Image (spheres, rainbow, N blue to C red):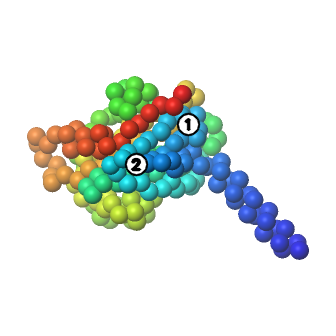
Amino acid sequence: MLRLLTALFVILLSTAAHAETAHLVAIDDGFRTTHGLSYTFTSDRLHTKGPRHRTDQFGDNPYEISLGAFFSKNGVVMIHAERVVDQSGASNYEDKPRSDWPDGSFRSDGAICIEVPAGEVEGEHDLEWLRDNGFEPSGTLAYAQYFATTSDFNDEIVVTLLARVAACEPGLDVDKALAPLIEAVVITRAD
């Protein structure tokens, strides 16, 4: 009987811990955040995977992380909804310029072209997760990230766009390469 009670207690604890880290939940055609930044992310053109919930440590700061993504044949829109566990305000992106997309609450350094060697995927959680879900994240990619945080810098959303391109060469219009992904996902502030 004691073993049964212990097993039930462990299940209850793991369920409670999972509920605390679920900052992104699945909805019809997308995701909804459940933390201090209330947004929905939907698409009727791309298929979804996730969300996946985990904890991690970045520098001295522990995070609860929920990850979901929208996939196309040649691109992905990753959504992270995260919380700084120790409430230290570690998710401060005020050094980045404001962005018009997804809305004026987000900040971004803009779009660039990157080369991701296959060896860099191994051991990197998000890249391995993309690979496991059908998108090969190595190679030549158009890339952009957009960050929004609560005023105390403890809850955040990170939207990452990745699209295949032939080569990082002068004259490549990276924004144009990412435009189909931006057009395919509707991001709405719910509050």
Does the rendering let one see residue 96? Answer: no
Amino acid type, callout 1: Asp
Does the rendering let one see residue 40? Answer: yes
Q: Work out which quarter of the rendered image holds the N terminus and state it.
A: bottom right
Q: Work out which quarter of the rendered image holds the C terminus and state it.
A: top right
Residue at point 21%, 44% (across, down): 177
Q: Residue furthest right?
A: 1
Residue position marked by numbered label 1 in the rendering: 155
> Badge 1: how crowded within 10 Å, few (<14), some, or many (20+)?
many
Residue position marked by numbered label 2 in the rendering: 78
Amino acid type, callout 2: Met
Residue at point 38%, 38% (across, down): 186
Q: Residue furthest left?
A: 171
Percent across and percent down for residue 79 are 44, 46
Residue at point 24%, 58% (across, down): 139
Q: Nearer the viewer, residue 7 or 108?
A: 7
Residue 43 position (above or below residue 96): below
Percent across and percent down for residue 6 are 82, 68
Where residue 134 is drawn, which disc sits there? Answer: none
Percent across and percent down for residue 129 are 43, 60
Residue 107 position (above or below residue 111): above
Distance of label 1 from label 2 (alpha carbons): 17 Å
Query: Which secondary structure, mark 1?
Result: strand
Residue at point 40%, 63% (across, down): 133
Q: Nearer the viewer, mark 1 or mark 2?
A: 2
Percent across and percent down for residue 34 are 58, 41
